[in-house]
Image (cartoon, grey):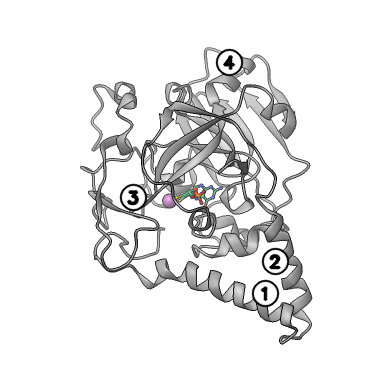
Amino acid sequence: MLIKRSPNGIDLPFPSEITPRAVFESRRDFIRQLALGSIAGSALLEMANREAFAQTIGAAKLVAKPNPTYAVMEKKTAYKDATSYNNFYEFGTDKADPAMTAGSLRTSPWSISIEGEVKKPMRLDLDSLMKLAPLEERIYRLRCVEGWSMVIPWVGYSLSQLIKKVEPTGNARYIEFVTLDDKKQMPGLRSPVLEWPYVEGLRMDEANHPLSLLTFGMYGEVLPNQNGAPVRMILPWKYGFKSAKSIVKIRFVKEQPRTAWNLAAPNEYGFYSNVNPNVDHPRWSQATERRIGEDGLLARKRKTLMFNGYSEVASLYAGMDLKKFF
Ligand SMILES: Nc1nc2c(c(=O)[nH]1)N[C@H]1C(S)=C(S)[C@@H](COP(=O)(O)O)O[C@H]1N2
Ligand SMILES: [Mo]
């Protein structure tokens, strides 16, 4: 999202934003032709394997009780769109890359280490982590800093439930999320688009806000790899990049963490990155957005809402100049 042109500046969809569906269709075609035996070659077996793997991703059910307090009453984004139009730079910078290459991510066994300013540091395997609190389904809007948004039913629980268990010390003022960085599993790490590992962070009161969702699934299934399996954050009032994927470490710290996007372009991506239609990105307006699935010539831009519509977080920022702390 750093290098790309303004996705928000013109009304026609960019070619790069149309590609995923084309890729998807051609992939389906490819599989069909494979089945008909009309394609042959040595690389095919590997591709067929990858496809078979991709088909199983997301297949495991993860059903949770819907929480009506957190259910956006808007049309849900199609599963196909939410799982084929992704930002996950560890798997490439094109929107279509993660769905095609994240099959190499091994999500089991998985554990997450909780360290730093806590009385009870711990390493939890995924199963124990998931059982720490009841899972809920929450339908959240998520808006990318690039100017598009989706509405997705996520499955998880409030991060505050985990924070409470590890008992932060009085020194814990911020929390840091660290994504896996394994070159063998993540081809995108070979290119220096960001400083790896991908790191994100929150102030402790933001992390404890009930909206902050430690997320294990979407659409009633475990997270597909391209969406950040097996565990990620979802922070619906912030730009999408704050919601780190495939987390292996959570650190409680005294100082404001140095986050991946802030390091890459400090004048473009601030630490807070709250969705704010009144503060433009230096290279494009943030006043409107395009809902994924509403593309096409007749698609209307939606007005972007302050805090992405989650006005209940406003008190976290009372008295702060949001143009300065963007
Ligand atoms: N580790 C990691 N997490 C990440 C990213 C990334 O590149 N790496 N991209 C972010 C961005 S820019 C967005 S918009 C969301 C996209 O989440 P989705 O693919 O599930 O819609 O993930 C965020 N989390
Ligand atoms: Mo994003």
| Horizontal side, residue 255 vs residue 41: left or right | left
Residue 63 got which mark? none
Q: Residue 252's quadrant in the figure? A: top right
Residue 325 is at least partly visible in this image: no
Q: Quadrant location of the N terminus?
A: bottom left
Amino acid type, residue under disc 2 in the picture: Glu
- Depth check, mark 4 against mark 2: the one in front is 2
| Residue highlighted by disc 3 | 268
Mark 1 or mark 2, which has the lower sequence index? 1
Kindly tell me whether mark 1's CB lies below 8 Å from ligand 1.
Answer: no
SS type, badge 1: helix
Which is closer to the viewer, label 1 or label 3? 1
Q: Nearer the viewer, mark 1 or mark 2?
A: 1
The Cα–Cα distance between marks 3 and 4, rounded to whole angstroms, is 33 Å
**In this view of the protein, can residue 202 be seen by the observer?**
yes
Q: Which residue is mark 1?
A: 31
Query: On the image, numbered disc 2 is attached to which residue?
Result: 51
First along the sequence among labels 1 and 4: 1
Q: Viewed as shown, does residue 142 lie left or right of 63?
A: left
Tell me whether circle 1 and circle 2 mark residues in contact (CB < 8 Å): yes
- Residue at label 4? 164
Task: Left or right? Give the position of 51 relative to 99.
Answer: right
Give the residue type at disc 1.
Answer: Ile
At x 69% / y 25%, what residue is drawn?
Answer: 131
Tell me the SS state at disc 3. Answer: loop
